[in-house]
Amino acid sequence: MLSKNALSKHFTIPEHLILDETSTYLLKNGFKLLHIGKVRNTFSIPGDKNNLLVVATDRASIFDFVLNTTIPNKGAILTLLTVFWAAKQPSVKTHLVPCASKRKKYNAAYDLKQKYPGIDVSRCLVVKNLRKRIDPAELIFRAHLGGSVFSDYQQTGIVAGQTLPKNITKWSKLDSILFTPSTKENAGHDLNITAQAYYEAMGEKGKSFVRQLSEFYKNSYTYALKCGIIILDAKFEGSSEYGIIADEILTCDSARFTDEKDFADAMKKGLDPKPIDKQVLRDWGNSLTIDAFGCKSWKELDPSNGAHCAYVHSIEVPKDIVQQVSATYEKLWQRLDFRNIKEAQEHYLGFKN
């Protein structure tokens, strides 16, 4: 188990939310906790240097801060979405490791469970250990122009160093997929960079990887649209060196989904489309009056500052907000696949509850 001192170093997360039930079990059975992210805990696997085990918890975050609450079933649905999208385009390389047993359609976490029965395969994935080969950037692709980058476009007509056509309206469909990378900061807020800056840093393999991800996003966009869902934009991480998509894939936390009909109505009224994600949580956060350490907004708070994190952790998230977010995650899944969540977990992961 982690010592009290070790836990205290992860001040960005409320201490009681660092270790969920599965993570606690893993530590007791020889797995080493390597990394604690906003949502996921990453472990080494005893006797396996080539792969890692990632646990998707139910932790929730907004504006780069982890909140003092959990979203029921969030980790399980994020895990299911990642496996689902990877299965839709099997020719695309991802960091997911398949079973060594006859049930190859399942993730290798299914095999691990045979030896470690406390592993919850509904929220655990075995992934390739890419070590330090992950690109130091978040790779964001946009089929629609909105969000924070639309302000850049309004001011200069340029987004991520790319000059766009004039008179693009907010959230309108772009003629081609737009690549807008950002840095990936260990602490604090990520910073937008130009596409050219990414290409210069990652070379020809970076350009090839961007083309690969753009096509993956485009194909996923087409599938989702058949389900009445629009993927406005999406964030990926991965290794351009190996051409492998890593981390989560097109989940509610890494992509912006909206209902096709709601989108059409919003465009007619000049409004932002209603997202199918944790937007209700962001809206709640924005409704709060921030008044601490001389800060008057979330943007002024520093996620790398322990006192600022403690202040955010002291804020109680209303139960109805938590329930709405949980229901939204489940709603997205129900729109994308004909199976209910329990059926899908058995089909894609071999999980039986």
Image: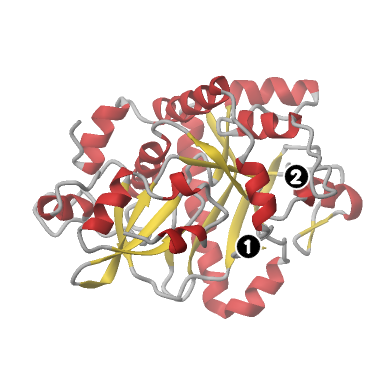
Residue 287 position in % (x across, y down): 75, 29
Task: Name the quarter where the N terminus is drawn.
Answer: bottom left
- Amino acid marked by disc 2: Trp
Quarter of the image for residue 68 reads top right
Is the C terminus in the top left, top right, bottom left or bottom right quadrant? top left
Q: Residue at x 89, y 55 (%)?
A: 156
The tag earlier along the polypeptide, 2 or 1, is 1
The residue to which callout 1 is attached is 187
**Side (left or right) of 188 relative to 106:** right
Does residue 245 sit above or below 275 in this rendering? below
Q: Quadrant of residue 34?
A: bottom left
Q: Position of residue 157 (x, y in %)?
A: 86, 54
Secondary structure beneath disc 1? Answer: loop
Which image quadrant is residue 45 in?
A: bottom left
Between the residue at mark 2 and the residue at mark 1, the CA separation in whole angstroms equals 15 Å
What residue is at 66 percent from the left and 60 percent from the top?
304
Tell me the kind of residue under disc 1: Ala
Residue marked by disc 2? 298
